[in-house]
Each structure stands twice: as structure tokens, then as C-alpha cells.
Image (spheres, grey):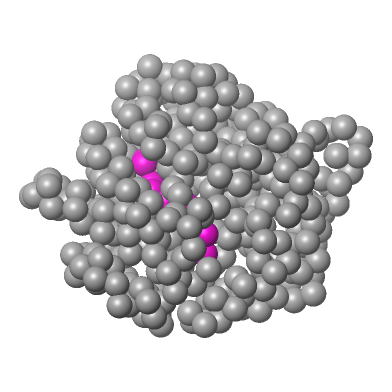
């Protein structure tokens, strides 16, 4: 096992459905603490299980992640995987039958996590806690509702279902991405509201769920009345507000550093290494860089070499507390394999409860 004092803060991806030599070399780097899968990494359950088993053979303590929320953000959709409803569908159900909506949300979380774990995935970046203002194209139906109270209740229910299957959760995108129209994948969203308004509305689910959230992912959004830096690079947001004011003590992931808004800090575009360092120095425990293994993977090699250099010259110092928070996200119980899962009465009941997406 990796020495926890080393701190493995980097989450990277792999190129395809099988590991190549370059993937194995990168995964063996002691600063890599996780891998994130995408649809391109998926052919079917047997292939995904074999891929994850090989990854774990290289690094038993690595965190295998995926963005698997339901609705349009669901990476694995074939070979027996249940098509999960959008979170908006659960919010719509709340307006008709609040109790049933919470029950369905539990079932959704249970199915989501159990199916992933049966294929060797440890962790999903869910649930979305952003509010649905009806303006954001990137959030849209990924949000449960406009009302933060509904968001908090349904998110807690979904998280409970995930926990039943042995999976931790990640609330995103702190303190809220739903108010801005711009998509941070291709632009730099700016939310000009003040701190009081944001804390009273968009950030309320984080306040209410602080004891249940295992991880949080900040938004690549600038809130200039609070800080000139995007939230994921802001010590004010992450340390003073999230950890200090709200009392959050779980893991903090950066959002994807390959996004347009991710490396523009204080008006300047930074290298991937400098952006990751800025995120960690601001209060993130883990830095996420996606979709850079395709092709020659030069960007990933640049990042790994950059971190080795930063460690050597003192620009980056390992944080044992961050490493412990990363490890806390690893499943504590063995996964139920697919065949046994299909025979589980609780799982079958959960699937039957889900509305058609």
C-alpha cells in the first residue's frame, strides 16, 4: 500500500477499454490517487470488471471513479445497466407525491451504486446539488429542483441509497452552478450575486447536508463579490466558507482542470500543473484532469512530471490529512458481484420503483 504521508492527489483517466503500457506507467505514479472512467472506457460488464481489476492490481488503494448521475450523465447504459432517471424527474415526482419521491430517490441511489460496484467502480460524482433556475444548459435536468429544501431532501435520500450499496457521495458544484447560463466546459461563468444571497439559496443544501456529504466538488464559476478566483481555486470559498463557516470535513475535488474555466486564474491561463497546484493550495484534496490520455497523453505526462518537479523544489508539499480524506472514499465492504446482485430482492425492488427515464 502507498505510504499515506505521500499524498496521492491526482485523478486521471485511461485511454480505452484496456490498459496500455502508458496507462500502467501513469497509474503506478505515487501521486496518482484515482482514475475516472468515461463512455469510451466501456464495452460491457465483463470488460469493465477486468479493466478495474487490472487497475487495482497496479494500485490496490486507487479510487476508481465515474460521472454516473442518471439522466443524460450516465456513462454505462448497456449490458444490463439500468437507465436511471434524471434528477429533475425525481423533483417533478416530489410535486405530486413527496413521500414516494424520497423512496424513489433512495432506490435510484441504491441501483446506481450497486451496479457500478458490481463492475469494480468505487465512486460516482453524485448527486448534483445545483438549483434549477431554468437558465443553465449544462445543469438543466441534472438538478432536482429550484427549491433548495427539495434538493436537500432528495439528495439525502439518493445518498442514503448509495450508502446502502457501500458507495460514498460527492455533492456538486459548490456553492452553486445553476444560476449562471454559461457552460464552464467552454466559457467562464460569472455569478454577480453577493455572498449572503448565495448562502441563503444555492449553498443551503451544503449547509443542511454537511454531516452526510463525503465529498464536495466546487464550481468553475467566479463569484466576484466574494472572490476574483473561481470557487475551486479560492481559499475563501473552500477554507473560510466551506470548511470554516459550514463545517465540512470531507474530501474536496477540483472540477475537471481541462475545462475552459479551469485554468484561467486571476486573468491568466495557467499550465495544468500550476492549475492543479493552485486548486490544492486553495483547499482541494484532489485535482481532476479528464480526457487527456487519448492520443499520446502528453498533457498527463506533463502533469506528472510537473508534480514531481514541484515536490522536488518545495512548491508542493504532501498533505497527510488530504490523503486520509481520499482513502475515506474507498468502499469499506466487498462489492456484491453481478449475478448475486441480480438475485437480490432489495435490488430488484429498487429497480421496479424507478420511473422510466
Residue 355 visible to the viewer: no
The one nearer the camera, 107 or 179, is 107
Residue reaching furthest to the left: 96
| For residue 56, above or below residue 191 | below
Name the main secondary structure of what is drawn in magenta.
loop
Quadrant for residue 38, please give it: bottom right
| Residue visible at 26% across and 53% down in the picture | 106
User: Is residue 282 found inside the magenta-colored segment of the image?
Assistant: no
Q: Is residue 125 magenta?
A: yes
Residue with the most extreme right position: 313
x, y percent for residue 36:
59, 60
- 102 or 167, which is in the foreground? 167
Residue at image coords 66%, 56%: 61
Magenta residues, start to end: 121-130
Classify residue 152 by image quadrant.
Answer: top left
- Kindly tell me whether residue 233 is visible in this rendering: yes
* Residue under the image location 36 percent in, 41 percent down: 129
Residue 341 in percent (x, y) is at: 36, 73
Q: Is residue 248 left or right of residue 163?
A: right
Quadrant occupied by the C terminus: bottom left
**Between 55 and 340, which is closer to the camera in this rendering?**
340
Please give left or right for residue 143 compared with residue 240 in the image: left
Does 181 sit left or right of 185 as displayed? left
Q: Which residue ends up furthest to the front in the rendered image? A: 333
Compared with residue 253, is residue 55 higher up or lower down, i.e. above or below?
A: below
Where in the figure is residue 206, as x and y percent of width and height?
39, 32
- Residue 299 image position (x, y, % from top left): 76, 57
Amino acid at each position: 500500500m502507498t505510504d499515506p504521508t505521500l499524498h496521492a492527489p491526482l485523478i486521471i483517466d485511461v485511454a480505452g477499454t484496456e490498459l496500455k503500457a502508458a496507462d500502467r506507467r501513469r497509474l503506478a505514479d505515487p501521486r496518482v490517487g484515482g482514475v475516472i472512467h468515461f463512455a469510451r472506457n466501456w464495452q460491457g460488464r465483463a470488460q469493465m470488471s477486468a479493466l478495474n481489476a487490472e487497475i487495482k492490481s497496479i494500485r490496490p488503494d486507487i479510487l476508481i471513479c465515474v460521472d454516473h448521475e442518471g439522466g443524460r450523465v450516465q456513462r454505462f447504459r448497456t449490458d444490463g445497466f439500468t437507465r436511471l432517471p434524471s434528477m429533475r424527474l425525481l423533483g417533478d415526482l416530489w410535486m405530486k407525491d413527496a413521500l414516494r419521491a424520497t423512496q424513489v430517490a433512495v432506490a435510484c441511489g441504491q441501483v446506481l451504486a450497486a451496479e457500478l460496484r458490481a463492475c469494480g467502480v468505487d465512486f460516482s460524482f453524485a448527486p448534483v446539488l445545483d438549483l434549477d433556475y431554468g437558465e443553465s444548459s449544462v445543469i438543466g435536468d441534472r438538478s432536482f429542483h429550484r427549491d433548495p429544501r427539495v434538493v436537500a431532501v432528495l439528495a439525502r435520500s439518493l445518498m442514503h441509497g448509495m450508502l446502502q450499496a457501500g458507495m460514498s457521495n460527492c455533492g456538486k458544484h459548490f456553492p452553486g452552478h445553476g444560476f449562471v447560463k454559461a457552460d464552464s466546459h467552454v466559457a467562464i461563468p460569472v455569478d454577480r450575486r453577493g455572498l449572503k444571497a448565495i448562502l441563503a439559496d444555492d449553498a443551503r443544501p451544503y449547509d443542511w447536508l454537511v454531516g452526510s456529504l463525503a465529498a464536495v466538488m466546487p464550481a468553475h464559476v467566479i463569484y466576484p463579490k466574494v472572490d476574483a478566483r473561481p470557487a475551486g481555486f479560492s481559499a475563501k470559498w473552500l477554507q473560510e466558507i466551506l470548511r470554516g463557516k459550514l463545517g465540512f470535513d470531507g474530501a474536496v475535488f477540483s472540477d475537471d482542470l481541462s475545462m475552459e474555466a479551469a485554468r484561467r486564474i486571476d486573468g491568466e491561463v495557467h499550465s495544468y500543473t500550476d492549475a492543479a497546484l493552485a486548486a490544492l493550495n486553495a483547499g482541494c484534496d484532489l485535482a481532476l484532469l479528464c480526457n487527456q490520455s487519448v492520443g499520446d497523453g502528453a498533457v498527463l505526462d506533463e502533469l506528472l512530471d510537473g508534480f514531481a518537479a514541484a515536490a522536488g523544489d518545495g512548491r508542493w508539499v504532501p498533505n497527510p490529512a488530504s490523503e486520509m480524506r481520499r482513502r475515506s472514499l474507498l468502499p469499506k465492504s466487498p462489492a456484491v458481484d453481478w449475478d448475486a446482485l441480480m438475485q437480490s430482492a432489495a435490488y430488484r425492488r429498487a429497480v421496479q420503483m424507478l420511473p422510466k427515464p
